[in-house]
Amino acid sequence: MRKKAAIILCLILLLAVDSFPASPPTDIIKTDTVTVTIEQQYESVRPGAESAFAIHFQLAKDWHFYASAKTAPGGMNLKLKPSAEKLISFSEPIFPPPIDYFDEFSGQKLDVFSDKFTVFLPFSIEDFQSEAGTSLTVNIDILGAICSKTECRMPDFDRLSAEVKIDITAVMDNPGFALPDLPKASLSTEPAMTGRQADYSALGALILALLAGLSLNIMPCVWPVLPIIVMRLVEQAKQSKGKSVSLGLTFCLGILLFFACLAAANIILQLFYGTVLQWGDPLRIPSFVMLIAFVLIVLALFMFGVFTIVLPSSVAGKSGSQKGYAGAVGMGFLAAILSTPCSFAILAAAFAWAQAQPLPVGTIAIMFIGIGMALPYAILTSIPALLKNIPRPGQWMELFKQAIGFVLLIIAVKLIAALPQVRRMDVLYFAVVLSFCAWMWGSWVGYNTKPVRKWLIRMIAVILAIFAGRVFLPAPTGELIDWQKYDSASIQTALTNGRPVLIKFTADWCLVCQAVDKIVYSREDIAKLLEQKNVLTIKADTTVKDYHATLALKNIYNEPGVPVTVLFTPGKIEPVRWRNMFFADELKSQLDQMTGK
């Protein structure tokens, strides 16, 4: 009865795959988090012919495999390792397109497989003569970490197996499924990125890059500096045409300088590190995201009139001054930087295409993005008469500035929401203090305020902002706890001597474990209590399945995955266990109840 029930269940799972007709699997792996079945393309295979397996995965809700070794923590992405007798040779597996997954605790964007998906494993049969035919056994090992939002596991999956029937008379014109139509380059151990690739010509791509650069001028992040830019252009129009044009082109040079830096970074990464610079890479760095969010908040306060920006002569571009040219370059560079947090998808597409080309072509394409952004300013400064069409300043401009301030705050909130959860509240607290300091800077002094008092107030504002940064945005530090490697003998000795033991089961590929380190073990009060109570602190690394800690986690502690923290207290038979991330207060309470050294 069990065998019949298993066959019926497999048939139901196969029917759920829309693109493949039903076919009984020859084997099945089933755990509480994933079900894996295997299907053959042909019932029988001729010698010298090609065929394939379809390995179907059905994951439980909220669980996922890491798809790419580049983004998978510890390189623990999903892998298939087939083995068989000599007559069968395998091609690289064909993975489906991954989906984007944002891990809120690490702030990383990952490629994952979730829900229901299929991996194809092509193979070929060596050409040999056998009238009677034969069958060969194929074994497939499945490797990789499987994770949810609160737990990661490194399962020791059973081996999938299938019998390939080889028959010289086999007819192979009615396959059970068809392989996806993918280029040979996509047959690799990495998941195939089968999303639509750019198929436009080089000329079309350069036009796209030019349009992408033009679009940067309407980015909300650039709006705060637009009034300053317009003031510069109007001021330049009052000078001689030669001076106006030279200052305008210098401003454009500042924009191009920023994109030249990007092109240089792309060249260095490709030549020396074998990788590319993605447009969104800086936004995956929490410190960069925080910096941009704070800049946007300060610029929003500027739009609200909380403080004003007094333009120095280097920025105002006084006639004949070399500082005017330096200010023009700096203002252009700043405008380009501010365009990065909220750029449109067209910009990312142009940048991605450029990186896929030979370095000279890619560099030209990246510079075309900068040319597109600088083009309107070059035209306006070359034809000063166009500046006469700019509307006169009035109340509408003030209302428009304030409206832009709210837009900037929305963008800043969105950036803060993308930060790791453990950092968001601290960032918000610091943002409030930073806003208060900006208010002090602009509103506590006036035009007639004595210079000594003005600088004293502003110095206090700066000191307060720095102090708040030290409190709410501490720099990453080393581990506060002296962790020992997992050793069952030392643990047993400590327990025999009545010494408390804390074991932290973790893994390099477990992002939730990293969150535990930040939330629990980075607290100084907990680190001090662990030292005061003479607790033996053990870091049990389960990154690899044959580590001693990995075997102990499964065979001694009967835990399915990480993170797990186990605390042995003298006098108590059963240890206390925590399988979540937010147990710092409970751990502190347990430590407080212990006696000292």
Image: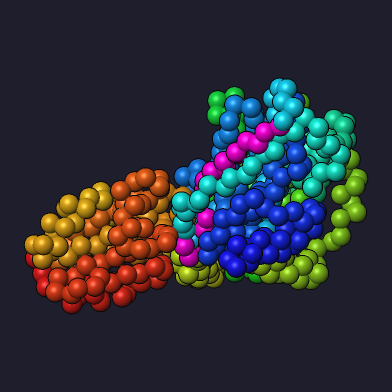
Question: Total number of numbered labels?
Answer: 0
Residue at 64 percent across and 53 percent down: it is 37
Q: Is residue 119 above or below residue 537?
A: above
Colour pattern of the rendering: rainbow
Q: The N terminus lies in which quarter of the figure? A: bottom right
Q: Is residue 421 left or right of residue 382?
A: left
User: In the rendered image, is residue 457 in sight?
Assistant: no
Residue at 10 percent across and 66 percent down: it is 498
Q: Is residue 357 above or below residue 384?
A: above
Which SS does the magenta portion mostly show?
strand
Q: Is residue 486 left or right of residue 161?
A: left
Magenta-tinted stretch: 133-151
User: In the rendered image, is residue 203 in sight?
Assistant: yes
Q: Is residue 31 left or right of residue 585?
A: right
Q: Is residue 467 above or below residue 349?
A: below
- Between 73 and 204, the one nearer to me in the picture: 73
Residue at 64 percent across and 30 percent down: it is 88
- Between 96 and 455, the one nearer to me in the picture: 96
Q: Is residue 456 above or below residue 55?
A: below
Q: State yes or no: residue 395 in magenta.
A: no
- Residue 568 in percent (x, y) is at 21, 67
Q: Quadrant of residue 295?
A: bottom right
- Residue 200 in percent (x, y) is at 87, 36
Q: The C terminus lies in which quarter of the figure? A: bottom left
- Residue 541 in percent (x, y) is at 34, 50
- Residue 488 in percent (x, y) is at 21, 53
Residue at 64 percent across and 27 percent down: it is 87
Q: State yes or no: residue 148 in magenta.
A: yes
